[in-house]
Structure formats: structure tokens, C-alpha cells
Image (cartoon, rainbow, N blue to C red):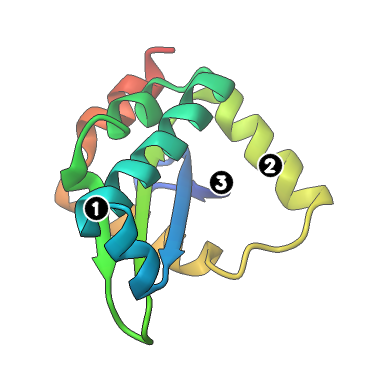
Amino acid sequence: MQMATVTLADGTDAVVHSEGTAWSPATVRAHGGRAGLVKDLLALVDTEAVSLGCAALRQASTAAANVVVDDEHGVLYAQVRVLCTHGECRALAEHCEKVGTPDPDAAAARAWALTQAREGVNEEHTKAGASE
């Protein structure tokens, strides 16, 4: 799971959790099509949610509507992004950004978060993350 720190327009420190997986056409056919891909990705997100103790991730892992599927480039790619304000997630993301390999998707994740916050989308996930 990738994490990118972001500061929202209202000054709130937040994190974008991102998880994605890609399957070849043969794997998609063998594992229940798009529904299987989405189910697998949500299971990965749920595992991370439990590991991090993150309510925002846990909530996102229960809804297929949180998954964006792209079928370009000969593979089926599914991704989940979750906006979170949980303090422990923010601290871990800051640490990872200091000592880890830079996330090539971080700029896109931050732009996504700012759009979500501006449009009020994903608000329930942010609130859930803040309550932990």
C-alpha cells in the first residue's frame, strides 16, 4: 500500500492510502472476471486496514464502488484511493516519505485528495479516519 501525505485546503493534515493490482486477461477469466479482481483488491485493502488500525481503510474495503478499474494496456488494473485523517497513518506516511523510495503516484494521489475534499466526496472516510 502506498501512502502520500497531503494538507487539505482547510489546513487538515491527511493521507491518501492507495492500493492497486493488475491482472492479465487470462487471470481475470480464471478468477471471476472484474468482480474477482475487485474482490481481491478489497481483500488487500481490508488486510492493510486491520494492520494499520485505520477505520477509513476498513470502511473503503467494504464497497466495490470505491474501486476504479482501467482496462488499458492489455491488463485489467484496479485501484482504490482513500482519504484519511488518522494521526497514526499521517505519522507513518511522513516517516515513509522521509526514509522510503518516493512514490511515483504521490502527486496524482495528492491532486485526487484535494479534489475529493473540495467536492465533499469521500467525507465519510475522512471522518472515520479522524475518529480512530
Query: Which of disc 1 and disc 3 is earlier in sequence?
Result: 3
Measured Cα–Cα span from mark 2 to mark 3: 14 Å
Q: Whole-percent x and y of residue 47?
A: 49, 28
- Report whether 68 appears left or right of 83: left
- Report whether 120 appears left or right of 99: left
Residue bearing the label numbered 3: 1
Q: Secondary structure at mark 1?
A: loop
At label 2, the amino acid type is: Glu
Q: Whole-percent x and y of residue 50?
A: 50, 20
At label 3, the amino acid type is: Met
Query: Which of disc 2 and disc 1 is earlier in sequence?
Result: 1
Q: Would residue 121 be visible to someone looking at this image?
A: no
Q: Whole-percent x and y of residue 11?
A: 43, 41
Q: Residue at x 24, y 52 (%)?
A: 32
Query: Which of disc 3 and disc 2 is earlier in sequence?
Result: 3
Residue bearing the label numbered 1: 32
Measured Cα–Cα span from mark 1 to mark 2: 37 Å
Q: How many marks?
A: 3
The residue mark sitting in front, 1 or 2, is 1
The residue carrying pointer 1 sits among few (fewer than 14), some (14 to 19) or many (20 or more) residues within 10 Å by Cα, namely few
Q: Whole-percent x and y of residue 59?
A: 29, 26
Q: Residue at x 44, y 68 (%)?
A: 108
Q: Secondary structure at mark 3?
A: loop
The residue mark sitting in front, 3 or 1, is 1
Q: Nearer the viewer, residue 76 or 112?
A: 76
Mark number, residue 94: 2
**In which quadrant of the rendered image does the C terminus lie?**
top left
Question: Is 69 rendered above or below residue 117?
Answer: below
Measured Cα–Cα span from mark 3 to mark 1: 24 Å
